[in-house]
Image: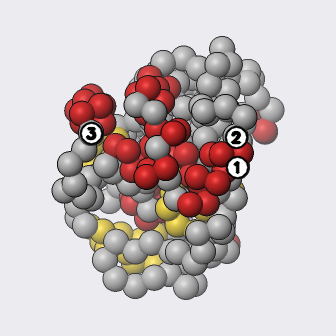
């Protein structure tokens, strides 16, 4: 997951404050841009979106950062959780992400994986930030020149990102968010595509025909409905690495 700018002036806990200071941020200026592409029906029609200035974490949230949420008792603090998420939390067999102790996925600089939307949201609330909207994520990835991939228009390679050519994984493992320095967006974000899918706040929809109007739009229909994910993963093929590519999962999926 990526997280984006502070939205609340409420006092943060000391542990969350310390964690927030250690996060590196990329500044994304206010802009109007065209959301979507002509490459897939679910990315159409192209629509103009206006965003306020925001900042987004330079890398996906790593196991090292997420571990501070665990150490602060985040899985025992209902105030950080949506009621549906807290219900899921009570049903979980352990108070930590899936794969958290799996050597293939638990490196300190590897993105935290095996977290539901509700776990990602609870972490963000503890930190005093939010998950990005679909529009914020896409603009942070492609920038004002509408790059096809965060690094530009060059086709993906395993030197640029962790993905599965033809959906055949080379190795089922996570990689450090710093392993592919060429996988960088126009605003300096690293590892936005490949490696893991990233939750966005928007509910899923088949296309942009009913795009919400106004500044900083977020498409919301139901708390229990599927949520958009972006960026592909280490198990997806190269087509999912495009900045405009979309997918979705039910919020309880880990």
Placement of the C terminus among the 4 image quadrants: top right
Residue 153 visible within the image: no
Q: Residue at x 45, y 82 (%)?
A: 212
Q: Residue at x 34, y 71 (%)?
A: 216
Residue at which label 2 appears: 92
- Specify the color scheme: secondary structure
> Label 1 to label 2, Cα distance in Å?
12 Å
- Image coords of residue 183 (percent x, y): 45, 34
Name above or below for residue 102 compared with residue 95.
Answer: above
Residue 129 visible within the image: yes
Task: Determine whether the residue tagged by mark 2 lies in a helix, strand or loop.
Answer: loop
Task: Determine whether the residue tagged by mark 3 lies in a helix, strand or loop.
Answer: loop
Indicate left or right for 10 with 1 as reference.
left
Residue at which label 1 appears: 253
- Image coords of residue 71 (percent x, y): 44, 26
Name above or below for residue 112 compared with residue 124.
Answer: above
**Nearer the camera: disc 1 or disc 2:** 2
Task: Determine whether the residue tagged by mark 1 lies in a helix, strand or loop.
Answer: loop
> Label 1 to label 3, Cα distance in Å?
28 Å
Task: Name the residue nearer the viewer: 41 or 70.
Answer: 70
Residue at which label 3 appears: 13
Q: Check contact, mark 1 vs mark 3: CB within 8 A.
A: no
Task: Name the residue nearer the viewer: 237 or 211.
Answer: 211
Q: Residue at x 80, y 32 (%)?
A: 168
Determine which quarter of the picture holds residue 182.
top left
Please tell me which of labels 3 and 2 falls first in the chain: 3
Task: Name the residue nearer the viewer: 36 or 197.
Answer: 197
Q: Residue furthest top?
A: 103
Please tell me which of labels 1 and 2 falls first in the chain: 2
Category of crowding for the residue at label 3, using alpha-carbon neighbours closer than 10 angstroms: few (below 14), some (14–19), many (at least 20)? few
């Amino acid at each position: 997951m990526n997280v984006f700018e502070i939205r609340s002036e409420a006092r943060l806990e000391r542990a969350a404050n310390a964690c927030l200071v250690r996060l590196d941020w990329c500044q994304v200026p206010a802009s109007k841009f065209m959301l979507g592409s002509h490459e897939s029906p679910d990315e159409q029609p192209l629509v103009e979106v206006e965003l306020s200035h925001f900042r987004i974490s330079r890398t996906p949230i790593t196991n090292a950062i997420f571990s501070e949420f665990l150490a602060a008792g985040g899985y025992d603090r209902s105030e950080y959780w949506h009621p549906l998420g807290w219900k899921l939390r009570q049903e979980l067999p352990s108070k930590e992400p899936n794969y958290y102790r799996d050597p293939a996925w638990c490196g300190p600089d590897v993105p935290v994986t095996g977290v539901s939307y509700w776990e990602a949201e609870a972490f963000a609330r503890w930190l005093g930030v939010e998950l990005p909207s679909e529009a914020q994520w896409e603009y942070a990835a492609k920038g004002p020149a509408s790059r096809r991939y965060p690094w530009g228009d060059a086709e993906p390679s395993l030197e640029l990102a962790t993905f599965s050519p033809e959906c055949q994984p080379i190795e089922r493992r996570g990689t450090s968010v710093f392993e592919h320095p060429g996988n960088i967006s126009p605003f300096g974000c690293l590892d936005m595509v490949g490696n893991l899918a990233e939750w966005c706040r928007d509910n899923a929809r088949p296309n942009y025909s009913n795009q919400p109007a106004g500044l900083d739009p977020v498409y919301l229909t139901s708390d229990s409905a599927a949520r958009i994910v972006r960026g592909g993963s280490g198990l997806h093929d190269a087509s999912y690495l495009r900045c405009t590519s979309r997918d979705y999962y039910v919020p309880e999926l880990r």
